Image (cartoon, rainbow, N blue to C red):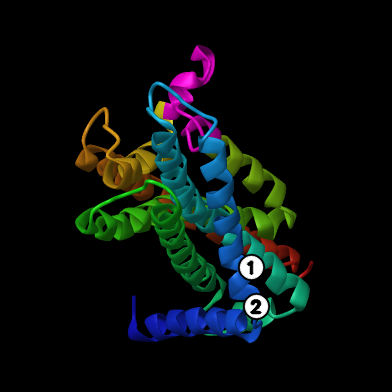
Amino acid sequence: MSRAAWRATQAMVLRDLRILLSYRFRWISILLGPAVFVVLFYYVSRLVVVESVGSSDGYFSFVITGMAGLAVLTAAVSEVSTTLRNEQIAGTLERLATSAFGPLRACVAMTVYPVLQAMVVGMVTILMGMAIGNLRPGLPELVAAVPALALVAFAFAPLGLLAAALTFVVRQATMGVTLMITVFSVVAGVYFPISLLPEWIRWTSDVQPFTPAVGILRHLLATSPLEGSVWGDAARLAAFTVVLLPLSLIALRAALAHARARGTMTEY
């Protein structure tokens, strides 16, 4: 990335941060959601004992670490298309589309701030779990959770770019993205062990990358055993990124060309 592109990306991140800070209580609402879920699942865990996760405290640690990963996944996949749609409706996408930075690099840069914010929310969720429940990772494991969350973000950012491409073509991609995230959360076992899934659908847990992502977080923070190794699961996530990122950029470039040809890039 050139120095000019890097500075433009920084400017977009600062812009999004300033927009957030311009609403006095918005940051409270961002953190209130995880707080509600942490408290909710703490009391739900008092009612749940699953053999594969052990005691109620084991289930609480299980679900909180899954939610931290889900926060990053959701931001990486859905926030770019949502931001694009808002830019189209507000009429501010024209400035990005006609700038020297260009719409393609602008779409890529739009992924940075939401992912950073989601990583903060994920870490806050973990800290809330430590404060309320029996989630007790050591300091090295807690520090290691930061690059683990970043790895999740990098792995799923290509899906966010594909959603952005779809937004330029059909405008509304929210429903499809929400459905995809829901499917990922179910088959990866965010809220319950994948061993409880029916046999006919359990294979989907092994062919998508969110399962190893959640597994790494649980191994680090809740001492859950892995079927393989941390490095093996990390390699699966990296491979997913390496394969899908070029395809997502090609799809986004094609969607931009389609929107230019039809003159609909900034229409809402």
Left or right, 113 with reference to 51: right
Which quarter shows the C terminus?
A: bottom right
Which residue does the image show at 23% across and 38% down from the upper left? 232
Label 1 secondary element? helix
The residue at the point 37 percent across, 55 percent down is 149
Residue under the image location 40 percent in, 21 percent down: 51
Cα separation, mark 2 vs mark 1, equals 7 Å
- Residue 12, compared with residue 167, is above or below; it is below
Residue occupied by mark 2: 25
Q: Residues within 10 Å of mark 2 (few under 14, many from 20)?
A: few
Answer yes or no: is residue 254 visible: no
**Three-letter code for the amino acid on which mark 2 is drawn:** Phe
**Residue hosting label 1:** 29
**Do the CB atoms of the residues marked 2 and 1 lie less than 8 Å apart?**
yes
Magenta region: 186-205
Q: Nearer the viewer, residue 165 or 213?
A: 213
- Rendered location of residue 132, percent (x, y): 45, 53
Mark linked to residue 218: none
**Is residue 191 a member of the stretch shown in magenta?**
yes
Residue 93 or residue 129, whichever sits in front: 129
